[in-house]
Image (spheres, rainbow, N blue to C red):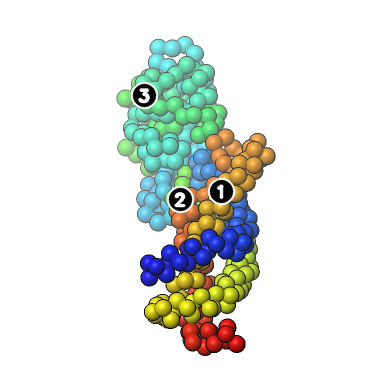
């Protein structure tokens, strides 16, 4: 077997023109497909990356004045499609003033209910009595992590304003949250709403008002995040059907990107299938003609004592060698084409994103697939080599 493999490789190197033709056929099919796959990956990854970098793409907000209880939020949290879930108070009471403890400057901002697990926080933790600020608000008040702030609100019918102390644990980058906002626990927003509803908050210096023990917590809406982009639409539909409400989400945009990915995959599969048919035909006839031309050589090897059934190794070894060389040439040309494409369209991609990308897993699958493909096509020729009668072949040559 080792001798036959050596003879097959030496014969392949001697027949350089046939080797070049097979390699050219492989490269002519593989390089365009590799470029198409790489561009598809680059463009799709850029679109998906843009959505994933914006946590609002996963967010679902209820619309209108609804009535939710803590039990409703717990129910939604138990759904497999749902990630982070928090209740929302009435939007009328979201606007507050923020200042640093001991500071003079203050800015108006929006209170946003949040907590550990909120995708907006990008993995940061947020506990009771803590706050995370948007970059815009932190910059205007010169605040950083560790600062002590007060969230201040006042009502015309209350004798005193409400000032809630919070500790800043982080400042979000601008791309995570725009504007002036304070992300904090829903309990803080609930206290603000209770203040506006004329309840007494003696621990914060508000002695006058109704007894908090009589208050029944009721919330205007929910802020829900899907676990991933593919679950956004099902989760939005489930929320609307369960609570008979309208919601707001970027479902259409997300669905458009996901559909684009599926359509690109389908187009690539169809293109690869058609190309594979042509490649298979070219390789089958190429290997078959090679075996036909070497019938006397193979017959001589059989008469020298090599089992006829082992002759199938001859075209298969040559096919694998062609496949390996073809892969090396194809990936070399692909890298060159990718650099040209990157140079031509570099300005059209987000920073840090490449136009043409292939993962190591994809490279491995492509290499394995090509080698299996050329081996399978060579087996058609190998069957003819193995079934040939050496004596009959030599007699035909002598005649």
**In the visual, does 282 lie left or right of 114?**
right
Decide: marks 3, 1 in contact (CB < 8 A)? Answer: no
Q: Position of residue 383 (x, y in %)?
A: 49, 80
Whole-percent x, y for residue 77 in the image: 38, 51
Instruction: Give the distance between the C-alpha atoms of the residues marked 3 and 2, in whole angstroms.
Output: 45 Å
Q: Tell whether label 2 touches label 3 (CB within 8 Å).
A: no
Q: Callout 2: few (<14), some (14-19), or many (20+) C-alpha neighbours within 10 Å?
A: few
The residue under the point 45% across, 56% down is 364
Across and down, in percent, residue 84 comes to 41, 45
Quadrant for the N terminus in the image: bottom left
SS for tag 2?
Answer: helix
Nearest to N terminus: mark 3 or mark 2: 3
| Nearest to the observer: residue 135 or residue 42 | 42
| Residue 25 in the image: above or below residue 72 | below
Q: Which residue is mark 2?
A: 360
The residue carrying mark 1 is 332
- Mark 3 or 2, which is nearer the eye? 2
Identify the disc placed on residue 167: 3
**In terms of depth relative to the viewer, which is nearer, 393 or 338?**
393
Of marks 1 and 2, the one in the foreground: 1
Locate the C terminus by quadrant: bottom right
Q: Which disc, if any, is residue 159?
A: none
Which of 329/15 is in front? 15
- SS at mark 1? helix
Residue at image position (51%, 23%) is 137
């Amino acid at each position: 077997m080792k001798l036959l493999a050596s003879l097959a490789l030496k014969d392949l190197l001697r027949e350089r023109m046939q080797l070049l033709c097979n390699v050219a056929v492989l490269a002519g099919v593989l390089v365009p497909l590799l470029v198409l796959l790489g561009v598809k990956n680059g463009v799709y990854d850029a679109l998906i990356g843009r959505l994933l970098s914006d946590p609002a793409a996963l967010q679902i907000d209820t619309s209108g004045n609804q009535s939710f209880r803590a039990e409703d939020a717990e129910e939604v949290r138990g759904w497999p499609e749902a990630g982070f879930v928090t209740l929302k108070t009435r939007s009328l009471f979201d606007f507050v003033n923020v200042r640093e403890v001991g500071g003079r400057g203050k800015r108006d901002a929006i209170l946003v209910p949040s907590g550990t697990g909120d995708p907006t926080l990008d993995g940061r933790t947020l506990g009771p009595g803590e706050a995370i600020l948007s970059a815009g608000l932190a910059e205007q008040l010169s605040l950083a992590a560790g600062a002590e702030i007060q969230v201040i609100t006042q009502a015309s019918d209350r004798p005193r304003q409400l000032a809630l102390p919070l500790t800043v644990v982080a400042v979000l980058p601008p791309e995570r949250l725009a504007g002036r906002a304070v992300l904090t626990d829903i309990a803080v927003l609930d206290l603000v709403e209770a203040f506006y509803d004329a309840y007494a908050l003696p621990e914060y210096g508000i002695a006058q008002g109704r007894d908090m023990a009589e208050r029944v917590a009721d919330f205007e809406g929910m802020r829900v995040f899907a676990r991933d982009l593919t679950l956004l639409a099902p989760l939005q539909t489930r929320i609307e059907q369960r609570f008979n409400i309208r919601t707001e989400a970027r479902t259409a945009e997300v669905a458009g990107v996901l559909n684009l990915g599926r359509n690109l995959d389908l187009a690539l599969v169809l293109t690869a299938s058609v190309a594979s048919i042509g490649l298979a035909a070219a390789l089958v006839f190429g290997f078959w003609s090679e075996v036909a031309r070497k019938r006397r050589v193979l017959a001589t090897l059989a008469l020298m004592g090599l089992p006829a059934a082992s002759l199938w190794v001859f075209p298969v070894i040559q096919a694998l060698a062609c496949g390996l060389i073809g892969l090396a040439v194809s990936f070399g040309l692909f890298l060159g084409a990718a650099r040209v494409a990157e140079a031509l369209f570099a300005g059209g991609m987000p920073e840090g994103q490449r136009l043409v990308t292939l993962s190591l897993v994809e490279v491995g699958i492509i290499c394995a697939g090509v080698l299996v493909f050329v081996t399978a096509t060579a087996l058609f020729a190998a069957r003819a080599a193995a079934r040939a009668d050496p004596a009959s072949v030599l007699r035909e040559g002598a005649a």
